């Protein structure tokens, strides 16, 4: 394997690596916050890498973006106001805006350069950025939530990088407490929650932090994501109020296309593996 022809993300703690054969490197830069790279791959379209970690590819981003948005939007009874913390590639924003009930969606990413590069290299993910309901802010999501008024949002989606660097605080109790304060009565938070195979301890700490902050009703959903370590990823929905069944018939009649998500996928994603139930006494 000629290293110059492959991008490889190594995860030394797991003893694993994932590689994509590349045609060329299209761009690299050090932003004010992180090191950004864009590759053209042989089979996965374009690839965005932040600080050496795979973020988004043209070919497989739909799993992640659909599962970070639609399960929560079909769980909340009437989602009108949505914030996306992180999510600078704009793919989650595009999925959120497919919901006609959404009146205002704000994407708050600390790094404007991620969005500017997505506009060039992932234009399909940015196709809803000019929707009149969309607002793009480039500030720290931790500060945004801290400064927000009570009852100012129905769903907060934390579409962040791994919990290191600027994203570390996005997995902590203080942040979840601030989220609790600005969420409406039926408000939901969704957090990308890494791999249950590789990061069970982190998921446990995150679940404890959410519960301690008052977001004590939790659902972890599982889905494939071959780009990310282990190929098996998760999102955790955390709610103030008891989580009742999702709006299945609205979902079955959804007025938009998805590639992966549907009612059966929603139900299947909620199935909890034995080791996960055991770890968290579910
Ligand atoms: N799905 C991806 C993953 O799990 O690898 C995440 C994609 S998205 C590009 C992650 C974004 O989180 C990045 O654009 C980064 O700038 C943003 N981010 C990290 N820390 C942040 C913070 N404190 N506030 C707002 N955005 C943040």
Image: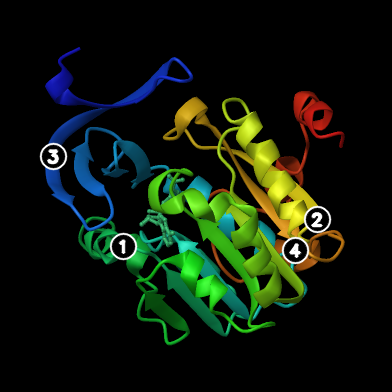
Quadrant location of the C terminus in the rendered image: top right
Q: Please name whichever residue, 218 or 77, is drawn nearer the observer in this view of the structure.
A: 218
Location of mark 4 (residue): 75
Location of mark 3 (residue): 25
- Residue 216 is situated, as x and y percent measured from the top left of the image, at 80, 55
Badge 1 element: loop
Residue 98 seen in the figure: no
Instruction: Determine the residue located farthest toward the top in the rendered image.
Output: 1
Disc 1 residue lies near ligand 1 with CB under 8 A: yes
Location of residue 252 (image quadrant): bottom right
Q: Is residue 129 above or below residue 234?
A: below
Q: Please name whichever residue, 111 or 26, is drawn nearer the observer in this view of the structure.
A: 111
- Residue 89 is situated, as x and y percent measured from the top left of the image, at 36, 59
**CB within 8 Å, label 4 to label 3:** no
Residue at image x 22%, y 55%?
121
Disc 2 residue lies near ligand 1 with CB under 8 A: no
* Ligand 1 located in image quadrant: bottom left
Assess disc 2: are there few (<14), some (14-19) or many (≥20) residues with their C-alpha within 10 Å of its C-alpha.
some
**Label 2 to label 4, Cα distance in Å?**
16 Å
Badge 2 element: loop
Sequence-first disc among 1 and 4: 4
Location of mark 1 (residue): 111
**Label 4 to label 3, Cα distance in Å?**
40 Å
Residue 216: mark: 2
């Amino acid at each position: 394997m000629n290293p110059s022809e492959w991008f490889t993300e190594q995860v030394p703690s797991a003893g694993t690596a994932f590689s994509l054969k590349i045609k060329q490197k299209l761009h690299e830069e050090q932003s004010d916050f992180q090191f950004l790279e864009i590759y053209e791959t042989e089979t996965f379209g374009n690839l965005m890498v932040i600080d050496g970690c795979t973020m988004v590819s043209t070919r497989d981003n739909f799993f992640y973006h659909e599962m970070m948005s639609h399960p929560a939007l079909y769980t909340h009874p009437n989602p009108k106001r949505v914030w996306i913390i992180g999510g600078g590639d704009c793919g989650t924003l595009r999925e959120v805006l497919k919901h006609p009930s959404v009146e205002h969606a704000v994407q708050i990413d600390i790094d404007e350069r991620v969005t500017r590069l997505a506009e060039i290299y992932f234009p399909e993910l940015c196709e809803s950025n000019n929707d009149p309901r969309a607002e793009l802010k480039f500030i720290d999501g931790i500060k945004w939530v801290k400064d927000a008024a009570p009852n100012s949002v129905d769903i907060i989606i934390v579409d962040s990088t791994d919990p290191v660097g600027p994203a570390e605080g996005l997995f902590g109790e203080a942040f979840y407490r601030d989220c609790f304060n600005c969420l409406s009565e039926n408000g939901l938070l969704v957090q990308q929650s890494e791999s249950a195979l590789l990061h069970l301890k982190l998921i446990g700490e995150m679940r404890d932090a959410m519960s301690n902050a008052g977001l004590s009703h939790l659902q972890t959903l599982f889905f494939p994501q071959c780009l990310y370590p282990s190929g098996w990823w998760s999102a955790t929905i955390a709610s103030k109020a008891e989580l009742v069944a999702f709006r299945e018939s609205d979902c079955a009649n959804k007025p938009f296309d998805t590639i992966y998500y549907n009612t059966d996928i929603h139900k299947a994603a909620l199935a909890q593996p034995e080791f996960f139930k055991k770890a968290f006494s579910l």
